[in-house]
Amino acid sequence: MRQFLDFEKSVAELENKIYELQRVETATEINIAEELQTLTEKAEKQLRVIYNKLTPWQKVQVSRHAQRPHALDYIKGMIENFMPLAGDRLYAEDHAIIGGLGRFKGQSVVVIGIERGSDLDTRLKHNFGMARPEGYRKAQRLIKLAGQFNLPIIMLIDTPGAWPGIDAEQHGQAEAIAKSIETCLRATTPIVSVIIGEGGSGGAIALATADKILMLEHAIYSVISPEACSSILWRDASQAAQAAGALRLTAQDLLKFKLIDQIIEEPVGGAQRDPETAISNVQKAIETAFGELALVPEQVLQAKRRNKFLAMGREEIN
């Protein structure tokens, strides 16, 4: 069953009517195709109107939608012969970060993704997409492996942030994130990162330090969640909608600020309504990005990547 967000109530009502009419048509064999077509067109039009004027807070809700495709869905849809590689070779395996080898459009690649899980069991297994230090150290190992075999790297990011638990702090969470950023900057092969849902705090930037940073149309990318920002600034988490606007966390704002390189179009109603199209759009965008990066020599690639991040925030934004 499709899950609707609060601001989609008008569409939900129309689609429920469509569903009921379809049941009546099946049970009675009465031809009501014309009525169904009218309602379907009305629902699609209403959905398009809603999604053409989403507020930042509504985009936050879309980015967190439970039925939105996650990292494993993209890996399944884009990567052939995927072979997962586990463990950081230091302490443990972290299921929040999935990584391994595979073939993308016939080319061998290293893929690293943050997985949130799609139901209660998988969300618990993947710790709701919040990685521990072991996960970031596994990512570092795979980035270095990519360099040894001259393989391009695909990063798929969807996390509310790194795991903030005491155990993570004891195991060196801050160092692991900082080292991941450094490892990305020193990588000798092209890196394309895609923010497919929520890009939260250092947990996201640890894997978003890339040559090309792509972002889905209704994804978000921010130094802090709107709820946490609201609690700090106004001491009231209920001001999250106002905080979302102040944070400028939408793909459209971030492209303007030159913090990302490209916005990937989503199906009308968000990636959750048509995962196959969303995955196909991401695949095409990654293929184009790799085509551009393949022409850049290794030393130039590293220098451009470093300068890209040094330049962030230094240009005047009108």
Image (spheres, helix red, strand yellow):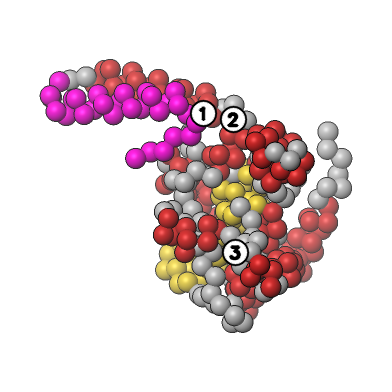
Residue 22 lies within the magenta run: yes
Residue 81 on image: x %, y %? 42, 68
Residue 144 on image: x %, y %? 65, 75
Is disc 1 placed on a helix, strand or loop? helix
* Residues at marks 2 and 3, CA–CA distance in whole angstroms: 30 Å
Drawn side of residue 141 relative to residue 41, left or right = right
Quarter that holds the N terminus: top left
Is disc 3 placed on a helix, strand or loop? loop
Residue 54 disc label: 2
Residue placed at 70% from the left, 49% from the top?
224
Residue 131 disc label: 3
Residue placed at 54% from the left, 45% from the top?
64
The mark that comes first in sequence, 2 or 1, is 1
Residue 7 disc label: 1
Name the amino acid type tagged 1: Phe
The mark that comes first in sequence, 2 or 3, is 2
Quarter of the rendering containing residue 217? top right
Circles 3 and 1 in contact, beta carbons < 8 Å: no
Residue 117 on image: x %, y %? 47, 56
Circles 2 and 1 in contact, beta carbons < 8 Å: yes
